[in-house]
Image (tube, rainbow, N blue to C red):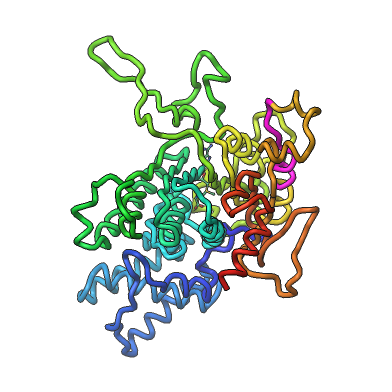
Amino acid sequence: MRWPFRLLPLSLPSKVEATRLRPSSFLPRILSRNLQSNASNTESEARLLERLIEPCEDRAAAKNELRWLKEHVQKTAPGDLEAQHAMLNSLVDERSTGKPLQYILGTEYFGDLELECRPGVLIPRQETAASVSHLVHLLSLAPKLRRHLRVLDLCTGSGCIPLLFQHEFTKARPEIQLRLLGVDISPEAVQLARDNRSRLLEAAHLQLPNCDEDQENSDPSDIEYNTPRRSLEVLKTTEFIQADVLAEDPLLQDPAGPKSDIPSLEAALRLQSTVRLGKGRHRTSTFHKDRPKCWPVLICNPPYISPDEFVRTTSRSVREFEPKTALIPPVNSQGQHIDQADTFYPRLLELANTHRTMVVLFEVADMAQALRVAQMAKSYRKPWDETHATNKTLRDSIRSGDLWDSIEIWRDQPGQARENGVPEVIDGFQVAGRGNGRSVVCWKYAARRWFGDEHPISAQIAKIKSQVT
Ligand SMILES: C[S@@+](CC[C@H](N)C(=O)[O-])C[C@H]1O[C@@H](n2cnc3c(N)ncnc32)[C@H](O)[C@@H]1O
């Protein structure tokens, strides 16, 4: 079993080297040219390298890390060799305790984006980026998408998923106006996601051609959009908020009100807030009336490791340095007999129903969990529909959106065809790509129309792809 949390990108030199050295939208990591190469330097470098081998797990990965650390100190103290030397030593000390390199350097690549990382918030993984990019690619092929598309990312962490979605989708379909919302229970995560958004917003401002700046605040519907202007506009409306995805809506459950200070998702979306009108007087008011309730795209990379697997299968650097609440879900309190690792998924399916979602992408740990989640999705039916179920055929239930129309499992590289070219099906579910089972993707019947007609989505996508090539 291979968790992305166990396989830190840094232990995969070839793939990650390519990723880390890819041009980024900000903070490019450039190899420095003024490395000293005399004998004593070589000796001290050899010593540094030795100290990095244990946390990196092999020599090649340790060499890459040493190079990145050197680039970092050269950028931080340009021209001051003594300071660079002292800093490099201290960073290698830190890294030799097992602290992930991303927390030391402060950034990690996610697709083409270089995002800020901080202790207390999960480091984004390339496997997650690959699933998100593939979903973006498929959606960008859909000729009949509405002009407005809303994407809800639950358990957003550093905000990496909505920010990458924006970055890639806007490039492909600048005519479509995205609305993105990221939600996390952790205040540190929400703050980091907001900071990452701000930095991308700054970068988007810099990319805006001068002639466009005057029109920046014009009515979006009046203007023919190009990618930089659309990015700017989408990032401006992108929000990151704190909410507990697992908490039931207190209005439905408990007339006495919420038990925790952290709102449920429903409450956060309603955004009811107490406004002080003066001493002793207050009233409830709704802010951001435009925060919508209907989210056609729902993405979530939830905590999905059981406590037992956390101990058995994760690396020391994950166990000791990454936040446990990002990795291990709480025990399911709904009395359902499901694995602790799966706690989030029934709730996510419920939220997809209440938010009238057309497509969901849920990350999972491996093929076994993918099959459990796909099975949950298959048997999920709108609760209110139970009484009518006997009157509806299966076909009617799918067409009316009471049941999912198509449920797929994606592997780590979902866009890559299998070596033998034969489509893969496990337990009746279509499986796409190569690598480990990584995500479950479910489509509603109505999403078929995004791709042109009423034919199954997979057939329509295959047809569109064959026309493009
Ligand atoms: C596996 S991490 C994913 C982070 C990010 N989406 C990514 O892919 O890197 C799970 C995230 O879920 C958040 N989380 C845990 N329990 C939550 C809850 N009950 N409600 C909302 N977010 C939660 C954690 O704070 C963490 O940021």
3 or 346: nearer the viewer: 346
Q: Residue at x 67, y 29 (%)?
A: 334
Q: Position of residue 338 (x, y in %)?
A: 72, 38
308 or 110: nearer the viewer: 110
Q: Is residue 9 above or below residue 185?
A: below
Q: Position of residue 420 (x, y in %)?
A: 75, 74
468 or 433: nearer the viewer: 468
Is residue 13 visible in the rendered structure shown here? yes
Q: Quadrant of residue 33?
A: bottom left
Q: Residue at x 49, y 17 (%)?
A: 257
Is residue 307 visible in the rendered structure shown here? no
Q: Quadrant of residue 425?
A: bottom right
Q: Residue at x 32, y 64 (%)?
A: 26
Q: Residue at x 47, y 40 (%)?
A: 184
Look at the image and tell me in which quarter the N terminus lies: bottom right
Magenta-tinted stretch: 374-384
Q: Position of residue 164 (x, y in %)?
A: 44, 57
